[in-house]
Amino acid sequence: MDHRDAALQTPVAAQITVVVLYFARLREVLGRDSERVSLPPGGHSVSTLRQELRARGGAWEVELAPSRPVRVAVNQDMVAGDAALSNGDEVAFFPPVTGG
């Protein structure tokens, strides 16, 4: 492979660390309000973070399951699951809020 072929390969993202915040019911059930989470090298998105957290099992798997209504903000902007994450981002998970 020459240098032109190497330049065409898609680079693999390095490990990143994000700050994760939990609100309302999630904070109560998961037993914490925040933590730093390191994600292994690869594509980093809200969905991959959620999968990493679900892999902890127990309440994590239940509360962050794809079927559960959980809203997400990255750096205080509401985002979808495919939103990309960067090193140092703040990711907030919270249940939908209803009012009366």
Image (cartoon, rainbow, N blue to C red):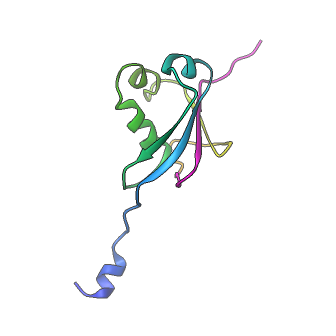
Q: Which residues are magenta?
A: 84-100
Query: Where does the image place residue 50, in percent across and percent down from the top left?
Result: 45, 36
Q: Quadrant of the N terminus?
A: bottom left
Residue drawn where x is 46% and y is 53% of the image: 16
Q: Nearest the camera: 8 or 91?
A: 91
Q: Residue furthest right?
A: 100
Q: Is residue 1 left or right of residue 53?
A: left
Residue 1 belongs to magenta span: no
Residue drawn where x is 65% and y is 46% of the image: 75
Query: Where does the image place residue 47, in percent across and percent down from the top left?
Result: 45, 41
Q: Residue furthest top?
A: 100
Above or below residue 31? Residue 47 is: below
Q: Residue furthest left?
A: 1
- Give the quarter of the image for residue 97: top right
Q: Quadrant of the C terminus?
A: top right
Above or below residue 67? Residue 1 is: below
Q: Nearest the camera: 32 or 69?
A: 32
Q: Main secondary structure of the magenta part?
A: loop
Residue drawn where x is 58% and y is 27% of the image: 33
**Total numbered badges shown on the rendered structure:** 0
Q: Is residue 95 left or right of residue 82?
A: right
Query: Where does the image place residue 85, in percent across and percent down from the top left?
Result: 52, 51
Residue drawn where x is 44% and y is 29% of the image: 66
Above or below residue 96? Residue 41 is: below
Residue 93 belongs to magenta span: yes
Above or below residue 52? Residue 28 is: above
- Give the quarter of the image for residue 27: top right
